Image (spheres, rainbow, N blue to C red):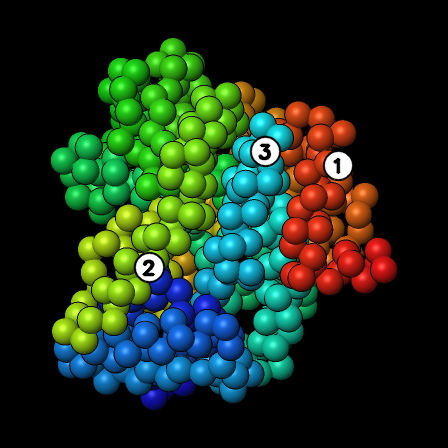
């Protein structure tokens, strides 16, 4: 890393989440001297990139820090000599997400853009692009870290680990940090006094133990949270449907908000059907939030991150990213939850697969903290999802139809092979423009 200050590159810089990232770098400027922040986007995103870039410049000016903001559509130019690269792009924009969510719903199946049939397709569109970025990084900034928030973050990390030569990749999600902050606020504690042993996969992570100032309070906290009310621990994009109290007590560990898709499938489906009729699928709701946000971002007197950004499900993402970069740069040795190579930390999962787990963060990257086996009650589901993820990553790189069909069929949200095929075929056609690896074969 250059002594003259860091060069950070954000791919998908025109994202509405970027102001949070800028805020994070400003906040940490003394310990993390970012000299250049390059926001990169593609031609179709140039309008948004300009709006975000102008806001970023106003934020930096107001904060009085020496951080240069560069805007570019030329990814290779940006990547040259970078120290950290963050990725937060969406191939096919929100229109593609709406298809991921809507098409399965037509057949009574939850689409879910990260861990359902929608997630499968988001991965098929995203993986070829991330592998291309990894290849460019190998050439242009081989010592940099790739920090990915692009969903499905677990599958994307799996794909980079498995199918690229570039190994300095870390996947990041806001769910663990969000759960920690919500538990802290519920207990009236500051987040630093709460520790949670997280282990599992992205959007399939469990809080195995919760500690308050070092004391294990898991059992008491589960008791407190088993009142049959809303948990207060969900995210904006997932309805906080109460858990069955006896189930939660029996499980003895904390599920994440995304577990509702598996343990409350019929209620979640009902919710999504209702919501899609009343206000549209989540992509359509997000589109409206984005319109409001970008209107606000264009206000020349705005020079801080606006509170409306908290209506998005990904709140704290960028804060997690900035903390991670800070800990790598400063070799802090603190504990953060990230997606990285398992290396035996969770014995129930393959050694060479990506897992989401607490890690010690050093200048050499994350070192997973071993937890042994996952409890038997959740082990099978986690393994099933890992198989779904691996086949998805394989299908994305090979463009093999049968692999994609098997991935779709083994996803627990999909009820049969026949329906999997119907949904797969319709989605392959709907996303044709972004899936050359499949259509090359068909033609
Ligand atoms: C959650 C997930 C993120 C996801 C986000 C979606 O927080 O952890 O991975 O991107 O929600 O939020 P949105 O506002 O786009 O529906």
Asked if residue 419 is positioned above or below residue 128 in the image, the reply reads above
Mark 2 nearby-residue class (10 Å; few <14, some 14–19, many ≥20): few
Q: Which residue is mark 1?
A: 421
Secondary structure of the residue carrying tag 3 is helix
Identify the residue shown where x is 34% and y is 66%: 18
Instruction: Please identify the residue farthest to the front as the structure is shown.
Output: 277
Secondary structure of the residue carrying tag 1 is helix
| Rendered image quadrant of residue 414 | top right
Secondary structure of the residue carrying tag 2 is helix
Please state which of the two labelled residues, at mark 1 or mark 3, is closer to the viewer.
Answer: 3
N-terminal label among 1 and 3:
3
Q: Position of residue 255 (x, y in %)?
A: 42, 29
Residue 287 appears in view: yes
Q: Which mark is residue 51?
A: none
Queried on whether the Cβ of the residue with tag 1 lies below 8 angstroms from ligand 1, the answer reads: no
Residue 144 appears in view: no
The image shows a total of numbered marks equal to: 3
Question: Is 164 displayed left or right of 155 in the figure?
Answer: right
Q: Quadrant of the C terminus?
A: bottom right
N-terminal label among 2 and 3:
3
| Rendered image quadrant of residue 440 | bottom right
Q: Position of residue 186 (x, y in %)?
A: 19, 32
Identify the residue shown where x is 50% and y is 37%: 204
Asked if residue 312 is positioned above or below residue 274 in the image, the reply reads below
Q: Which mark is residue 291?
A: 2
Q: Which residue is mark 3?
A: 106
């Amino acid at each position: 890393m250059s002594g003259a200050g860091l060069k950070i590159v954000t791919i998908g810089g025109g994202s509405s989440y970027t102001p949070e990232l800028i805020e994070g770098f400003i906040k940490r400027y003394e310990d993390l001297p970012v000299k250049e922040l390059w926001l990169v986007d593609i031609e179709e995103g140039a309008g948004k990139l300009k709006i975000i870039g102008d806001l970023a410049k106003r934020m930096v000016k107001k904060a009085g820090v020496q951080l240069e903001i560069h805007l570019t559509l030329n990814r290779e130019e940006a990547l040259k000599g970078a120290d950290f690269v963050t990725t937060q792009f969406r191939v096919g924009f929100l229109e593609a997400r709406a298809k991921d969510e809507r098409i399965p719903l037509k057949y009574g199946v939850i689409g879910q853009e990260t861990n359902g049939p929608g997630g499968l397709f988001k991965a098929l569109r995203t993986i070829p692009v991330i592998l291309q970025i990894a290849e460019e990084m190998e050439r242009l900034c081989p010592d940099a870290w790739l920090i990915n928030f692009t969903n499905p973050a677990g599958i994307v990390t799996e794909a980079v680990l498995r199918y690229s030569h570039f190994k300095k990749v870390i996947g990041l999600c806001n769910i663990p940090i969000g759960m920690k902050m919500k538990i802290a606020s519920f207990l009236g504690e500051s987040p630093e006094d709460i520790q949670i042993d997280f282990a599992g996969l992205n959007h399939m992570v469990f809080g195995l133990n919760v500690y308050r100032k070092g004391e294990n309070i898991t059992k008491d906290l589960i008791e407190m949270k088993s009142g049959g009310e809303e948990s207060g621990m969900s995210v904006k994009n997932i309805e906080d449907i109460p858990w069955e109290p006896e189930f939660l007590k029996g499980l003895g560990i904390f599920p994440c908000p995304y577990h509702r898709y598996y343990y409350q499938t019929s209620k979640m489906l009902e919710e999504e059907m209702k919501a899609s009729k009343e206000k549209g699928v989540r992509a359509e709701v997000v589109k409206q939030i984005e319109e409001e946000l970008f209107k606000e971002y264009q206000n020349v007197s705005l020079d801080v991150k606006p509170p409306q950004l908290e209506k998005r499900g990904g709140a704290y993402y960028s804060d997690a990213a900035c903390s991670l970069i800070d800990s790598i740069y400063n070799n802090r040795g603190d504990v953060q939850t990230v997606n990285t190579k398992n290396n035996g930390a969770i014995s129930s999962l393959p050694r060479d697969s990506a897992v989401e787990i607490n890690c010690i963060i050093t200048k050499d990257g994350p070192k997973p903290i071993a937890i042994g086996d996952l409890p038997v009650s959740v082990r099978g589901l986690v393994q099933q999802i890992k198989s779904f993820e691996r086949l998805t990553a394989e299908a994305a790189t090979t463009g093999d139809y049968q692999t994609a069909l098997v991935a779709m069929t083994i996803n627990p949200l999909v009820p049969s092979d026949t329906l999997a095929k119907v949904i797969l075929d319709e989605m392959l056609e709907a996303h044709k423009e972004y899936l050359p690896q499949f259509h090359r074969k068909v033609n």
